[in-house]
Every structure is written in C-alpha cells, then in structure tokens.
C-alpha cells in the first residue's frame, strides 16, 4: 500500500511559478513510477508528467519546457515545478503511483487545486 499526499497548490498570476509536492508513505517508494495528472472542470483527467525510479521523465506536450518533475527517493517525495504558468494550467493536480512493471496507476492522492489568473 502507498498513501500519497499532495501540497503546494494555490492561486498564482499568469507567468508565475508553483511547486507541487507529493509525499508518499511506504518503504518501497523507489520501486514506483510516479506521475502527475490534472483535471479541469468538465474535462478528463490528463497525464502531465511521469518519472521512473532512476529519473527517466516524460511530459505532456502542453507542459514541455515549463514543468519539471523530480523525485527524492530518500524523502519519499515527488515534485512538480511549474513555471510560466498559463490560465489553461488551472486544474486539480493529482499525484499517482504505479509499479514499474504495471500499466495502471493504482494509488492516488487527494489532489491539490492550482488556479492561474490572467
């Protein structure tokens, strides 16, 4: 079992920055692929970024060059640094975890709201 708790959301003006954190419980954190997802009102939940235990990263095209995902396995924490924020980045952001050998994300945090004003 893995429990995930996000923090760091808030209200920011367009062009600003936020850093989201996701603290995970469990001793096997490093075995999991971690992902950040987001869901805006009336829209589907979309994958934003992923990071493997060794630091391999993927990003959605819409955030490439602006967002950076990272992890600290010693602290059981994954981060999402968000720069040059746009109003369309406004959403609830979720942290999720899946086994490296798996396909689906089995564990989810409760979400943190990010609102970008124009």
Image (cartoon, rainbow, N blue to C red):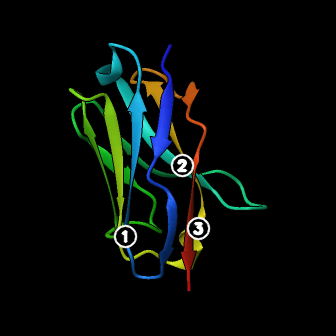
In front: label 2 or label 3: 3
User: Residue 76 versus residue 68: which sits nearer the camera?
Assistant: 76
List the residue tagged with mark 1. Answer: 17
Residue 37: numbered disc: 2
Q: Residues within 10 Å of mark 2 (few under 14, many from 20)?
A: some
Side of 69 where 108 appears, left or right: right
Q: Residue furthest right?
A: 42
> Image quarter for residue 105?
top right
First of labels 3, 1 by sequence position: 1
> Image quarter for residue 55?
top left
**Secondary structure found at label 1:** loop
Taking the spot 47% from the left edge, 30% from the top edge, the residue there is 97
Residue 90: numbered disc: 3
Q: Residues within 10 Å of mark 1 (few under 14, many from 20)?
A: some
**Secondary structure found at label 3:** loop
Q: CA distance from mark 3 to mark 1?
A: 12 Å
């Amino acid at each position: 079992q893995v429990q995930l708790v996000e923090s760091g959301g808030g209200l920011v003006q367009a062009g600003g920055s936020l850093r989201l954190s996701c603290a995970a419980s469990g001793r096997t954190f490093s075995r999991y692929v971690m992902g950040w997802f987001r869901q805006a009102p009336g829209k589907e939940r979309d994958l934003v970024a992923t990071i493997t235990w060794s630091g391999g990263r993927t990003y959605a095209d819409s955030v490439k060059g602006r967002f950076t995902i990272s992890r600290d396995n010693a602290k059981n924490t994954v981060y999402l640094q968000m720069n040059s924020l746009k109003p369309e980045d406004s959403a609830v952001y979720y942290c999720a975890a899946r086994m490296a050998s798996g396909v689906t994300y089995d564990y989810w945090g409760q979400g943190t709201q990010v609102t970008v004003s124009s």
